[in-house]
Image (spheres, helix red, strand yellow):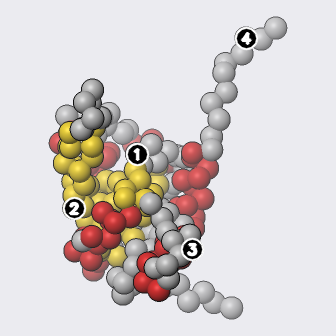
Amino acid sequence: MKSKIESIFIKHSGKRICQGDILRDFEYIEFVSSNKKIGTGIKKIFPYLLVLSQDCDLESDHKNHMECKDNQDKYLFSILVCPSYSADELREGTHLKEYGLKMNRINSDRWNNIKNNQNSRYHFLRGAQKLQIPNLIIDFKHYYTISRDVLYKDFKDYYLGSINELFREALSQRFANYLCRIGLPLLKND
């Protein structure tokens, strides 16, 4: 049987947040603790943000917020997301310059591995012009949890499109594998 999936990206109704959703120019206040009881906030703007939380959890959370307000057992406190960077900016090492960080430029050999998703740290997504999604790179070292209510507040204003089911499952597996890696010590030969 032929698959009914015809592209990497889809656009859904936007009634709820889904795994694989891509948001643009999402503003977020990150609170930094201080010696006092009240922390300070630093405003961050993510050029692109990708939702990684499992869709079954997001669906249950939304359904329970809409229908079962007397039972909060399925409520999520926060949603797992990864910032996504313009592929060209990441390759040049300029994707974090607004935070005062200078990253290394990626050479051709390493870049080809990243574009072919053969580097476990990164995930390359080929863009979709009609959804205004450029070629993106997700750096699995950079991930956040954002309060569910904060993410929902203006979700529709930031929503561009979503990664289709099979592709988001592959992305989710790659992210999980990256987080589960084990650094082994170098041992001396006896």
State the residue at coordinates (40%, 74%).
17
Residue 51, quarter of picture: bottom left
Left or right: where 166 falls relative to 155: right
Instruction: Report the amino acid beneath label 2.
Output: Asp
Q: Earlier in the sequence, mark 4 or mark 1?
A: 1
Q: Which residue is mark 2?
A: 25
Q: Give the total number of marks visible in the rendering.
A: 4
For the residues labelled 2 and 4, the Cα–Cα distance comes to 49 Å
Q: Secondary structure at mark 1?
A: loop
Camera-nearest label, 2 or 3: 3
Q: Are marks 2 and 4 in contact (CB under 8 Å)?
A: no
Q: Earlier in the sequence, mark 2 or mark 3?
A: 2
Camera-nearest label, 3 or 1: 3
188 or 54: nearer the viewer: 54
Instruction: Report the amino acid beneath label 1.
Output: His
Camera-nearest label, 4 or 3: 3
In the rendered image, residue 63, in percent from the top left (x then y), is placed at 48, 82
Q: Are marks 1 and 2 in contact (CB under 8 Å)?
A: no
Q: Which residue is mark 4?
A: 188
Left or right: where 56 falls relative to 108: right
Vertical placement of residue 22 versus 114, above or below? below
Q: Which residue is mark 1?
A: 142
Camera-nearest label, 4 or 1: 1
Q: Earlier in the sequence, mark 2 or mark 4?
A: 2
Q: Secondary structure at mark 3?
A: helix
Instruction: Report the amino acid beneath label 4.
Output: Lys
Left or right: where 69 falls relative to 13: right
Q: Which residue is mark 3?
A: 56
